[in-house]
Image (cartoon, rainbow, N blue to C red):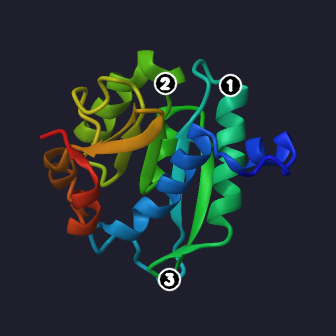
Amino acid sequence: MLSWLPRASIAQEIPTDYQIKAKYLEKFGKFIQWPDTIFAQTNTPMCIGIFGGGAGVPASRDVEFVSTLQNLAARDTVNGHPVTTILIKAAPDLRCCQIVFIPATMKTQQKEILDEIKNENLPILTVGESDDFCADGGMVQFVIENQQVHFMIKNEAARAAGLKISSKLLTLAKRAD
């Protein structure tokens, strides 16, 4: 029994859904193979972009999410590439990213963003959390089941963008195909 521990300590040890999602985003890059042209130089950073707030104004939760992700990414590399993060305010900003996260706060623009990435044939791993994310053309969708964060993958969408997802990651995911 852990009754001798103060309640605050126990509560602080339980990560939030967004902390877990940030950790997943930071690790996904290790299991994706992009076209050779994406990392032309050995020091080219892998960039994770997070759409924020809608109407160009980041929601405080989105800013907090970016901050959490930046702290994780600053300590890691993906195949030797440093990891950077940006808060995306408009679709043109996503072109420098290898992974793009579209939070539920951007649900009304989700389909339009995914269509732009697809229509421009950009090799970007798209990740979201809305219930219909994969149905709208996204590649990785976070789902909450039994109060735990899981994810499903629509591998067909990733392959169409020129991305190869490792079988190790695919075995951990639910299939959306």
Which label number is shown at residue 104? 2
Q: Amino acid at mark 1?
A: Ala
Q: Residues within 10 Å of mark 3 (few under 14, many from 20)?
A: few
Q: Residue 174: x and y, percent?
A: 23, 45
Mark positioned earlier in the residue sequence (2 or 1): 1
Mark positioned earlier in the residue sequence (3 or 1): 1
Q: Of 92 and 115, which appears nearest the observer?
A: 115
Q: Of 24 and 101, which appears nearest the observer?
A: 24
**Residue 38 seen from this side:** no
72 on left or right of 5: left
Q: Of 4 and 27, which appears nearest the observer?
A: 4
Q: Residue 145: x and y, percent?
A: 38, 33
Callout 3 touching callout 1 (CB < 8 Å): no
* Residue found 30% across the figure and 55% down from its top: 123
Q: Residues within 10 Å of mark 2 (few under 14, many from 20)?
A: some
Q: Residue 53: x and y, percent?
A: 62, 24
Q: Residues within 10 Å of mark 1 (few under 14, many from 20)?
A: some
For disc 3, the marked residue is 80
**Residue 117 seen from this side:** yes
For disc 1, the marked residue is 59
- Up the image or down, 133 lies above or below 150; here it is above
47 on left or right of 174: right
Point out the residue furthest to the front here: 1
- Up the image or down, 175 lies above or below 162; here it is above
Q: Amino acid at mark 3?
A: Gly
Mark positioned earlier in the residue sequence (3 or 2): 3
Distance from label 2 to label 1 (Cα)?
11 Å
48 on left or right of 145: right
Q: Residue 110: x and y, percent?
A: 39, 25
